[in-house]
Image: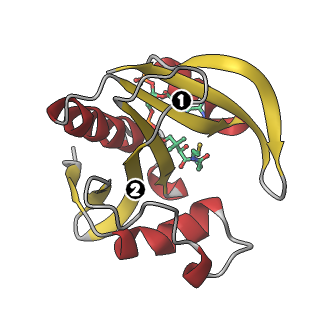
Amino acid sequence: MTQIIIRSITAEETRPLRQIMLRPHQAISELDYHGDDNEKTYHVGAFLDDELVGIASVYLENAPYKPEPKSWRLRGMAVLHHVQRKGYGKALLHACLAYIAKQNGLLIWCNARGGAMSFYQRLGFEVHGDAFEIPGIGLHYIMGRGV
Ligand SMILES: CC(C)(COP(=O)(O)OP(=O)(O)OC[C@H]1O[C@@H](n2cnc3c(N)ncnc32)[C@H](O)[C@@H]1OP(=O)(O)O)[C@@H](O)C(=O)NCCC(=O)NCCS
């Protein structure tokens, strides 16, 4: 079985996959998320051989449903189609959880796309509140779990 390699990457390295998998209607130059360059922000990549096939980022940011300052927001989670359902997403999420735990974080949350809801539920996230629409992208749910 091919080994999943997980390591930290730069914000710049995340952008091509953000574009391909999450925001194909936007230019790479527009895929600079707020907080990307904050020194506490963690960007992580999953590699198959030397190819970057998955990404995720976590930012120190309060969850909208809980005033817990030790909260981290997960954004830009994506795995290329040809390697989906092989454990890359789970490995990326576990790397984020390990990083947050090291920072003494207590909670992880995200705006989950409708299509990714089952993935997050499988990994212990729960839905908070009603579905909402992000224009141009679709239905989302706020989801979170403890770290
Ligand atoms: C969501 C996404 C990151 C999941 O990555 P992945 O590498 O395919 O997920 P994994 O293989 O690690 O799956 C982890 C678990 O979730 C389950 N799972 C993953 N995708 C699922 C889905 N669409 N429906 C149901 N279960 C799913 C897997 O079966 C696995 O369960 P297991 O631990 O019992 O085996 C990937 O499908 C993706 O990039 N989708 C498009 C972009 C996107 O929507 N990103 C999320 C933005 S909020």
Which residue: 69% across, 30% down? 141
Task: State the colouring used for the structure image.
Answer: secondary structure
| Residue 77, percent from left and from top | 48, 49
Which of the two residues, 55 or 100, is positioned nearer the viewer here? 100
Q: Is residue 134 left or right of residue 26?
A: right
Which residue: 45% across, 16% down? 124
Disc 1 Cβ-to-ligand 1 distance below 8 Å: yes
Separation (CA) of disc 2 from disc 1: 15 Å
Q: Give the image quarter of residue 139.
A: top right
Which residue: 23% across, 48% down? 4
**Which residue in the structure is indicated by mark 2?**
55
User: Label 1 sits on what residue type?
Assistant: Phe
Label 1 environment density (alpha carbons within 10 Å; few <14, some 14–19, many ≥20): some
Q: In this view, does 60 lie above or below 42?
A: above
Q: Which mark is residue 119?
A: 1
| Residue 92, percent from left and from top | 33, 43
Q: What element carries label 1?
A: helix
Which of the two residues, 7 or 36, is positioned nearer the viewer here? 36
Using the rendered image of the protein, determine whether residue 128 is visible from the camera's viewpoint: yes
Task: Check the picture and name the quadrant holding the N terminus.
Answer: top left
